[in-house]
């Protein structure tokens, strides 16, 4: 197993139940995958009871949706509860085919396995679009944002019409001179829809979520929206010095640009296998790589299983992946 976040732990749970000898190699120094690295106000979209890994429900949170710190505590306790064999910090450099399986090369030594599950996620590969021009102010991505305090009173452009863009814009709205730029008008999901409803839709009608909207109206986003603080503009054309330049030539001075423009899957360790397709992803049948039956990819998004990048959703695809591995090895 490569990756010790939520996807890796869910798979390790089923591997232990199946009685397969396994190890989880995690590059991080602490439990929790990407969750310890999110911004300070980051919360789940759902109550704790709808945000659990297989086997053990997330403990209740006293008020509303759990914050990231609650998730980290849960994931650390989950590891201990099931005595999962996580080794950290271990950085996987590459995976190669060998005559008796796959060789996983790491910074602490090599492993040979009959099957490998890659669950490295996307957080560690932030995406920033190529925008013409040069900007002399500060630029950062979602992964570097922590809170509004350091930006107080400054002119900040938040770029991105998804959940992270809306949440960070809402976090900043009452502290900065905010500009929110999106590629298309933001579409808020109905207020009553949370992560549990999204999971149900994603697993029964994979194309249904996009028709409803893009942004979950969690309480801080809803509050900022209702105060008319989340007013988006169409995406600017270019950067020039300390200005963003809009279509038509209008200019607006800004001090900071925060790119909430998503991520790409972390797959460089799999490059020696030569599996990537034209879109940069590895073609899969479920979670199994079509070009290498001994490799499974878990938790990267819908292309590795509906809702598989979520706490509540990853268990289903982890169970299916382990069942395939058991059948293959036995």
Image (cartoon, helix red, strand yellow):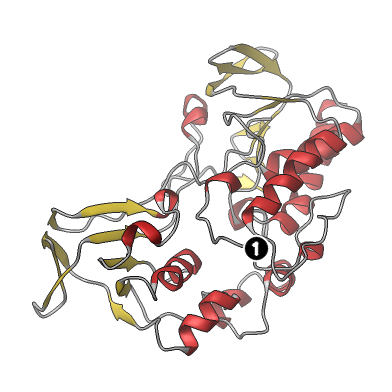
**Horizontal placement of 308 versus 214: left or right?**
right
Q: Compare residues 146 and 280 and report the one nearer the observer.
A: 146
Residue 141: percent from left, percent from top: 37, 52
**Helix, strand or loop under label 1:** loop
Compared across the picture, whether 130 is left or right of 274 comes to left
Q: Residue at x 36, y 78 (%)?
A: 184
Q: Which residue is more in the foreground, 260 or 208?
A: 260
Residue 325 placement: quadrant? top right
Residue nearer the viewer, 320 or 195: 195
Instruction: Give the quarter of the figure containing the C terminus.
Output: top right
Does 92 sit above or below residue 281?
above
Q: Is residue 188 visible?
A: no
Residue plotted at (38% across, 82% down): 185
The N terminus sits in image quarter: top right
Whether 206 is drawn above or below 234: the answer is above
Image position of 83 (left or right of 111): right
- x then y, percent, for residue 238: 15, 64
User: Which residue does the numbered mark 1 point to in the structure image?
Assistant: 44
Q: Quadrant of residue 245?
A: bottom left
Residue 279: image location, x then y, percent: 42, 49
Camera-nearest residue between 266 and 98? 266
At 73% across and 44% down in the image, what residue appears? Answer: 75
Q: Residue at x 70, y 73 (%)?
A: 201
Q: Is residue 203 above or below residue 290?
A: below
């Amino acid at each position: 197993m490569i990756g010790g976040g939520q996807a890796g732990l869910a798979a390790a749970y089923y591997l232990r139940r199946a009685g397969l000898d396994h190890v989880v190699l995690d590059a991080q120094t602490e439990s929790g995958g990407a969750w310890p690295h999110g911004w300070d106000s980051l919360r789940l979209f759902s109550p704790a009871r709808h945000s659990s890994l297989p086997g053990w429900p997330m403990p209740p949170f006293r008020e509303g949706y759990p914050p990231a710190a609650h998730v980290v505590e849960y994931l650390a306790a989950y590891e201990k509860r099931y005595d999962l064999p996580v080794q950290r910090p271990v950085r996987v450099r590459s995976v190669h085919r060998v005559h008796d399986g796959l060789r996983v090369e790491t910074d602490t030594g090599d492993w040979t396995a009959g099957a490998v599950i890659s669950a490295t996620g996307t957080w560690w590969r932030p995406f920033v679009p190529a925008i013409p021009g040069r900007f002399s102010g500060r630029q950062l991505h979602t992964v570097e944002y922590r809170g509004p305090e350091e930006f107080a009173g400054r002119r900040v452009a938040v770029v991105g019409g998804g959940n992270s863009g809306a949440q960070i814009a809402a976090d900043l709205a009452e502290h900065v001179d905010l500009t929110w730029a999106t590629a298309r008008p933001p579409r808020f999901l109905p207020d009553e829809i949370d992560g549990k409803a999204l999971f149900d839709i994603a697993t029964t009608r994979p194309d249904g979520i996009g028709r409803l909207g893009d942004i979950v109206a969690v309480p801080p986003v809803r509050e900022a929206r209702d105060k008319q603080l989340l007013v988006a503009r169409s995406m600017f054309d270019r950067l020039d010095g300390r200005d963003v330049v809009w279509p038509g030539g209008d200019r607006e001075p800004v001090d900071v640009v925060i790119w909430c423009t998503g991520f790409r899957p972390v797959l460089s360790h799999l490059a020696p296998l030569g599996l990537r397709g034209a879109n940069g992803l590895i073609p899969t049948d479920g979670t199994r790589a079509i070009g290498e039956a001994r490799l499974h990819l878990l938790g990267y998004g819908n292309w590795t299983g509906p809702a598989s990048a979520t706490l509540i959703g990853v268990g289903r695809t982890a169970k299916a992946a382990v069942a395939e591995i058991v059948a293959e090895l036995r």
